Amino acid sequence: MVLAVILILIVVGSLVFHFLNPWTLTELASQWGSMDTMLHVSFLITGVVFVAVTLFMAVAIIRYRHRGGQRARFQPDNRRLEWWLIGATTVGIVALLAPGLVVYSDFTRVPPNAMEIEVFGEQWRYSYRYPGADGVLGYADIRHIGAGNPLGLDPDDDAALDDVVIHGGDLRLPVDRPVRMVMRSKDVLHGFFVPQFRAKMDMVPGMVTHFWFTPTRTGRFEVLCTQHCGTGHYNMRGHVEVMEQREFDAWLREQETFGRSLAATANGERPDDPVELGRRLADGEGCMACHSVDGSRRVGPTWLNLYGSEVTLTDGSTVSADESYLRRSIEDPRAQVTAGYSPVMPAYSFDEDEMDALLAYIRSLSEDAGEE
Ligand SMILES: [Cu+2]
């Protein structure tokens, strides 16, 4: 009897929780309302079955409880009941799966007028690439990755030269225009996800995955990574800004194309200003995935006011962050690990000019930079 009451309370409690809990889906911002419909259909079917089965158990416990002088009747099978159960289960399973097939078929059928945008994932940030005037994303390969070319575009491919690369920045999209996101990963499995768009896709090293959607309202939404992609996973976030087409076009026109930045690097070889070269190196070599220059803590310590400061190491000792300390931190990061951080920074080797430029850049981020 107690058991029956508990079962009934579980049913009532679950229903009350379902209807009164404050957590709802984030407001939809793409045309994938069908994902929500599927979710609700699944909720409804599994909910009805859950309530029916649990209440049946409660009723059975009450009705067939032990009473003196009663005997159980042995009834090994009941054909009519079997058919009912098989029929109801079949209908339930079909109703759970069929809507998914319809939506998945939409999901894989990209509209022909979709604009193509590339998402590039690396530990631990997103970069994006727009096709430029020709509407075609140029050829890219991990082998071409280097300073000034963080996404590895092929400099010999004309289609790549007018591409626009947004390295580690925000994704911008025009509203009401279908987009096909093509995705690559540089290192490990990542998953591109914007909850308001409802659609997500894994980014797999060595292959190109894709999905499509149409943003249906303007606004700023958060981009998350759905795969546990390493110690900095929690930091793999970004933003997507959905704007009016006119605004978007104006913004895109202002961005430097890959060809133009390539030409700039080739002409001047390297910028004369070591601080500027250092900034580009730090960006291109992926340092900014773990370090910030605005004082915020990421996977690694910020570079703001690092130079000249007192750094506490894991063994409790302190060192002054001078040039030789910084140099050592870059070439042999595990030798002196900063307290409060994990020893996850890979060792780098730079030539003298590059190292000087990096140090000049880090120095420029400190107030007492002028002292030297
Ligand atoms: Cu990730």
Image: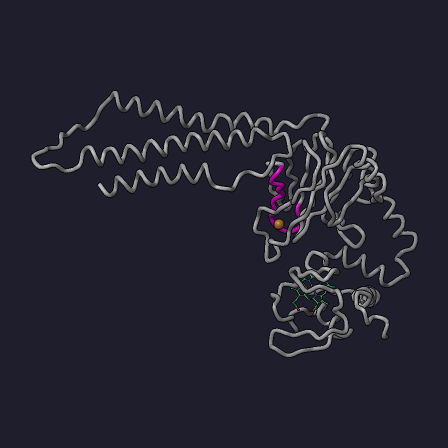
Name which residue lies at 73% across and 32% down: 115
Q: Is residue 235 left or right of residue 154?
A: left
Is residue 227 or residue 13 the one in the foreground?
13
Name which residue lies at 13% across and 32% down: 72
Q: Residue furthest right?
A: 267
Q: How is the image coloured?
A: one colour
Q: How far across and down, in percent of the image, does residue 226 sit?
A: 58, 46
Quadrant in which the C terminus is drawn: bottom right
Quadrant of residue 161 within the rendered picture? top right
Q: How far across and down, in percent of the image, does residue 280 sit?
A: 81, 56
Q: How far across and down, in percent of the image, does residue 181 sit?
A: 68, 37
Q: Residue furthest left?
A: 69
- In the figure, 345 relative to 40: above or below? below
Quadrant of residue 232 within the rendered picture? bottom right
Q: Residue furthest bottom?
A: 317
Name which residue lies at 26% across and 36% down: 58
Q: Is residue 210 magenta?
A: no
Q: Is residue 194 magenta?
A: yes
First to last magenta residue range: 185-196
Quadrant in which the N terminus is drawn: top left
Is residue 253 or residue 358 the one in the foreground?
253
Q: Is residue 143 left or right of residue 54?
A: right
Is residue 212 or residue 196 the one in the foreground?
196
- In the figure, 328 relative to 95: above or below? below
Q: Is residue 40 left or right of residue 266?
A: left
Q: How far across and down, in percent of the image, does residue 279 sit?
A: 81, 59
- In the figure, 23 relative to 178: above or below? below
